[in-house]
């Protein structure tokens, strides 16, 4: 099994990052803040004003270490990577499959099935953990109703024969799922009434948006490592500069992010004072709490579980890469269908 290499998140403003022998070194002024062996890295993610030496940038490009630039709020700005080394025949097959309406719909349907299944698993977990408590009866009834509606949406996906109808079912499921999301939050200070992205208008939405960005970054890296084209998707429409396939692959993992965000809130790792509200009504996570989140995310990626398709114990951080491998095998004709990762 492929080893899990680290992603380094650099958010110290005015940091200077350079190469010293085989190490990445981060300095602020004359003080060295971090030193990491480059061979252990999969990528660098830089927030805000972070400078990287051209020598380090070239070394990263030559050694398949991607560099991603985000603004201080986590919005994607740019990405630096070396020459694409993917199998051109695999990418050609991917593009031809994407141009075939029926094949695209079949893959998109499977990916969305994984997402809805995993959303339902999130609700079932909370019903199991809190459903028997006397003071939670109203919550339990609403969660149980939502769980049944998600099951119906999941079944109805099988009848969808176009991307538009699939997206319609997914939108219906999202309304059901996020309609009861507040019940999953055990800290009364955090309020959530709907999923809002542009901009996120409360701390919960801010956390979801930020963590979905991290997930998309990992999915894009996984696809590129596998040799697939992250811009050529099956579910999300093709658009210049849009990593459509990375967004496709991320769908089945979004409920994993939801559980991660809920854990941060419910375990009191974050509080309302960790967020900043802006004049346009949007919320962002402050710098130091963001360090807390990124450290927790890296820890979560080290957790292990048994992958049902490979039947091996793997780290959570490898899941996007493993799913990219399954997709590549399907496109090559080595297996009958793409199989999404289903949370138990």
Image (spheres, helix red, strand yellow):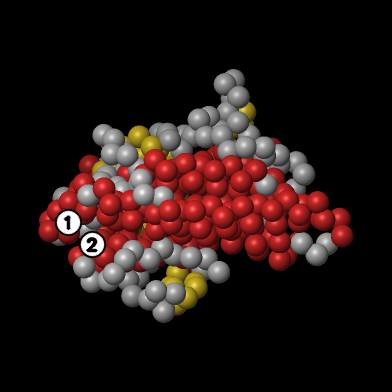
Instruction: Give the residue pinned by disc 2.
Output: 331
Task: Please tell me how many numbered marks the rendered image carries.
Answer: 2
Point 44% across, 73% down: residue: 307
Camera-side residue: 143 or 58?
Answer: 143
The residue lying toward the viewer, choosing from 296 and 56, is 296
Q: Nearer the viewer, residue 318 or 176?
A: 176
Q: In the figure, is residue 37 to the left or right of 21? A: right
Residue 157: tell me if it is visible: yes
- Residue 269 coordinates in the image, percent (x, y): 66, 52
Instruction: Estimate the x, y position of residue 230 in percent, counting from the top left.
Output: 28, 49
Neighbourhood count class around disc 1 (C-alpha, 10 Å): few under 14, some 14–19, many 20 upward = some
- The image position of residue 69, as x and y in percent, is 36, 39
Q: Quadrant of residue 241?
A: top left
Residue 5 is at least partly visible in this image: no
Question: Which SS class for mark 1?
Answer: helix
The residue lying at 83 percent from left, 62 percent from top is 133
Q: Which mark is residue 93?
A: 1
Q: Quadrant of the N terminus?
A: bottom left
Residue 139 in the image, given as x and y percentages of width and height: 77, 52
Task: Residue at 32%, 71% (x, y): give it.
Answer: 2
Dot placed on the residue nearer the N-terminal end, 2 or 1: 1
Residue found farthest to the right: 134
State the residue lying farthest toward the top: 279
Vertical side of 263 occupied by 54: above or below: above
Graded by Cα atoms within 10 Å as few (under 14), some (14 to 19) or many (20 or more), the crowding at tag 2 reads: many
Contact between marks 2 and 1 (CB within 8 A): the answer is yes
| Quadrant housing the C terminus | bottom right
Q: Secondary structure at mark 2?
A: helix
Q: CA distance from mark 2 to mark 1?
A: 7 Å
């Amino acid at each position: 099994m492929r080893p899990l290499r680290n992603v380094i998140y650099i958010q110290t403003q005015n940091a200077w990052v350079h190469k010293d022998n085989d190490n990445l070194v981060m300095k602020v002024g004359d003080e060295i803040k971090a030193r990491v062996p480059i061979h252990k890295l999969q990528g660098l993610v830089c927030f805000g004003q972070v400078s990287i030496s051209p020598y380090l940038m070239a070394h990263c490009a030559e050694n398949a270490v991607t560099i991603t630039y985000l603004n201080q709020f986590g919005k994607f700005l740019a990405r630096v990577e070396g020459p694409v080394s993917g199998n051109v025949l695999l990418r050609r097959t991917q593009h031809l499959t994407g141009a075939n309406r029926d094949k695209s719909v079949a893959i998109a349907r499977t990916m969305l099935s994984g997402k809805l299944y995993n959303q339902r698993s999130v609700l079932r977990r909370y019903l199991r953990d809190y459903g028997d408590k006397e003071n939670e009866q109203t919550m339990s009834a609403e969660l149980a109703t939502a769980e049944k509606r998600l099951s119906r949406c999941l079944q109805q996906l099988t009848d969808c024969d176009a991307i538009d109808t699939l997206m319609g079912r997914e939108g219906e499921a999202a309304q059901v799922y996020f309609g009861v999301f507040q019940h999953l939050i055990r800290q009364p200070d955090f309020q959530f009434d709907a999923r809002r992205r542009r901009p996120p208008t409360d701390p919960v939405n801010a956390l979801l948006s930020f963590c979905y960005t991290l997930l998309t970054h990992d999915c894009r890296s996984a696809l590129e490592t596998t040799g697939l084209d992250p811009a050529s998707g099956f579910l999300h429409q093709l658009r210049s500069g849009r990593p459509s396939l990375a967004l496709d692959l991320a769908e089945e993992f979004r409920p994993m992010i939801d559980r991660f965000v809920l854990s941060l809130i419910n375990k009191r790792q974050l509080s309302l004072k960790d967020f900043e509200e802006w004049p346009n009504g949007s919320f962002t996570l402050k710098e130091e709490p963001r360090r807390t989140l990124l450290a927790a995310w890296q820890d979560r990626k080290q957790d292990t579980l048994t992958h049902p398709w490979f039947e091996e114990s793997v780290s959570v951080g490898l899941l996007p890469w493993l799913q990219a491998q399954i997709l590549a095998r399907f496109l090559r004709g080595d297996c009958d269908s793409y199989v999404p990762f289903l949370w138990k």
